[in-house]
Amino acid sequence: MIKFRFCKFAQINSITSLKSRIGGSSKTPEYDLYRSYYNKTIEDIKEQPGVTIVKNINDAKRVIDILNKYKKQPHAWDTETIDIDVKSETPINRGKLICASAFAGPEVNFGNGPRLFIDNFAQNSDLIMLFKEYFEDEKILKIWHNYGFDKHIFGNHGINVKGFFGDTMHMARLLDPSKQPQEYSLAKLSLAYEDEIKLVKIKRMECLLKKPNLTDEERSSLQLFKDHLLDINLKTSMKQIFGQNKELKNGQVSKLKVYPKILQMHCLPQYINQWIEYSTLDSEITYFLCLTLKDLLNKTKIFYNLKPTDPDFQTKKSEFGINCLGDIYSKYWNSLGEILTELEREGMQVDMDHVKNIKLQAEEDMKQYEQNFIKWVQTTQEGDVSQFNCSSTQQLQQLFFAPCKKQQTKKTPQMMKEEEEEDEYLSDGRKKSIRKEVEDLPEVKSFQIDNIHQIIKENQRTPLKYTEMHIKGLGIEPLSYTPSGMPQADYNALKQLAGDVEKQQYGLIYHHFVGKGEPQKGIDACLAINDLLELKSIEVLLHTFIIPLIELTDPSGRIHTSININTETGRLSSRNPNLLNQPALEKDRYKIRKSFIAKKGNKLIVADYGQLELRVLAHMTKCKAMIDAFLKGGDFHSRTVITMFPHIQEEIDKGELLIEWDKQKGKAPAPLVKDKYAAERRKAKVLNFSIAYGKTATGFAKDWQCEVKEAQKTIDAWFAQRKEVEQWQYNVRMIAKNQFFTQTLLGRYRYLEKYFQQQTRSYINHGLRAAINTPIQGGAADIVIAAMVKIYKNQSLKDLGYKLLLQVHDELILEGPEENAQQALKIVKELMENPFEIQLELPLEVDAKIGNNWYECK
DNA sequence: CTTAAGCGCCAC
DNA sequence: AAACGTGGCGCTTAAG
């Protein structure tokens, strides 16, 4: 092999010399360099047995004919991309394809065998466009791993991929949602299901070899596959194949691993063969993994609400007409896979003027609070602390609670696991830390700060970049401790220090200063901490919501979050940015939800399920009291209150108290529960929500600031009328303990071995809480997913121009033409209230609103 | 420069 | 013996 053919090339042959071009423009000198070199590389590629390489138009045309010839069977695809940082960026309008690989079955011979590699770089950079018609043919089914990503990348090339057969990541999630998130990578799954995949491969081969009308082409493909590919079952990670230990200047080898850039692997002769092997293996594994997972999903039967002792255990279908996980996939999750990509691409329109406005406002508001607080901190310190960082937890811990001893921490299951594990190394060669031991806080601790005054230390000529700031602790008794044993400096703790400043009920720090005979200082401290709390709350809004919104909105003014199915309960999650945790209305001081708007001429429809999880609980437990309360309607928590307190029930019976009153009918003839018994109602509400989470008396006592006994009495009062819930929870816990799983409304499984294998109480308790929570939370997710599928498939909504934009756990957001809003709203409500063919034990209620922005619709 | 841990906080 | 379930993510700090 001729290396360094061009002199100038030496500079990019070294892995480290090339600065990351990821996310950059492809019209750069570096790219040109790759292009010029690549022409030669691609000509010199060694043909690998079993792999067909497409490197010109003629190859492409020939291969497309073959793909079309096998259009009756699904084809697995995978892509490799540049110009995108996959960790932090949406692939929408970002990222380009440099090659694609396919596998359509071991018998499908693309010329040199069943693995297909399509080049799409340099002189071939539009080769993929020849496949446009193929990809857009919805009759030809394609298999993907993490479909959303590839679909968007193709979208960037103007190819609207259709014919979605399945996503192996979603299949694996459905089959077993209880793994760590990183365990769903193609590499990890191929390892986890290695044995099953091998069997599927062999069976497939046997079946194909028996095929009566096998062509010569097919026979030779099968032979190539058998000789060269059949035994390759595991995908090695890119890091493993291409990672090298960095060479230090002194010639030693560092533990630091370095990796070539994607383009280097694609373009440099020393990588290209391995690169092609690596890329084509991806689609081949996706193909067999899909067959394997489909099989496993179909084999995983669902017998919900049936005990093994029931006579029809083996034969009875679930009430939803679902026999196995495979049915859930084909009925709901397959569509969901397609729906999520559409939500992502559609995105939400952002009112940039509003966001920029509130950004300025927030920054302005923060200034004064920050000044006030730091000014106060300065009064407690001898040295200069003008650079005190209010966002630093450590500095706050030091300021308030030092000196203090760290609390002895109990070993968490996580720590026990870490102790057992062998040393793990991080990608940069560092040993993965085994949870650092924290130390006691000294009275004075120093922190590194920017040397803004350009102070020059003794024995130094120039000012160093950093200098030190010393913080002397006030020595307040810590109120609570973090898991690592440090004093907690969260909202709760700081609030207790400050007290209620408005009401002049000063908090613990006031008493601290009073003890020292300085009450005025105490008041000042409370005021300062109060300002700090204000500052922190604004900071959170600014940094978690406002700034990311500005940074991540695309040039056309829409924001595209990426939506994942990656929770253990089957809920969705959202990233870049997370749009599912927008501040609740009460906390949204800058009305951030007003930033999410409908396009001009459009309206948003926001449709919420009312008390969805409680309804799922009522349905699954068949709890009479709860179902009854829901059927009667009105304020559910008020209804809960009256069943818990007999004297309140009496007042209702006598007509001295009302559950609800329509204000349009004038003044209420009697007081309402939510007014007269506001405190009780609040408790009932918390109970209603928290019991599903498995919260205990101790937890309630802490929240309500009462004795555990009293909390237990309230809980008992709740359960007294809801015996079915108690019984159901008992049953579910028993199944969890004995069989290590729990099931959602639709019968999806969540496996709990990991909680019960560890024999620590904390882990087991966690498992038991997860067991009773998952059916409810996951059941609610099942309902919303079913509703999304119904909405997506509804022709009337399509005709009205309404499209789904987002799901927020129990809420769906759609956008469409203003003139059709009322009509669409009716349909959406109807579909959401009837997500299944069957009716539940109680109706589902949906509250839907029309508005110009998300705020208006709430 | 990078990565990761720890903390804290947002939602349902 | 623990004490409320499911997530994403920004910031600080430490370390290679």
Image (cartoon, coloured by chain):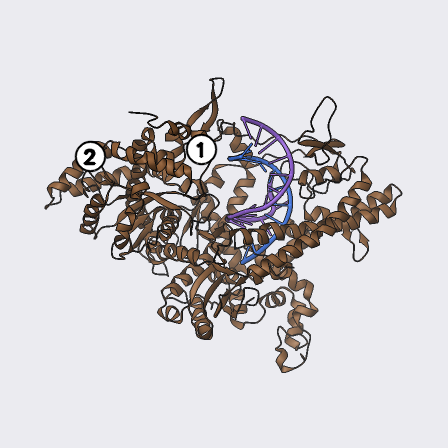
Chain colours: A brown, B blue, C purple
Do tag 1 and tag 2 residues touch (Cβ < 8 Å)?
no
Which chain contains the residue that carries disc 1?
A
> Is A657 displayed left or right of A46 in the figure?
right
Q: Residue at x 65, y 55 (%)?
A: A360
Asked whether residue A191 is in view, the answer is no
Residue that carries the numbered disc 1 in the rendered image: A18
Crowd band around label 2 with a 10 angstrom C-alpha radius: few (<14), some (14–19), many (20+):
some
Q: Gap in Å between the C-alphas at discs 1 and 2? A: 40 Å
Q: Amino acid at mark 1?
A: Leu
Crowd band around label 1 with a 10 angstrom C-alpha radius: few (<14), some (14–19), many (20+):
some
Residue that carries the numbered disc 2 in the rendered image: A226
**Which numbered circle lies on residue A679?**
none
Secondary structure beneath disc 1?
loop
Q: Residue at x 77, y 40 (%)?
A: A476
Q: What is the quadrant of residue A502 in the picture?
A: bottom right
> Is C5 displayed left or right of A112 in the figure?
right
Question: Which of the two residues, A727 or A777, is positioned nearer the viewer here?
Answer: A777
Secondary structure beneath disc 2?
helix
Residue A357 vertical placement versus A459 (above, below): below
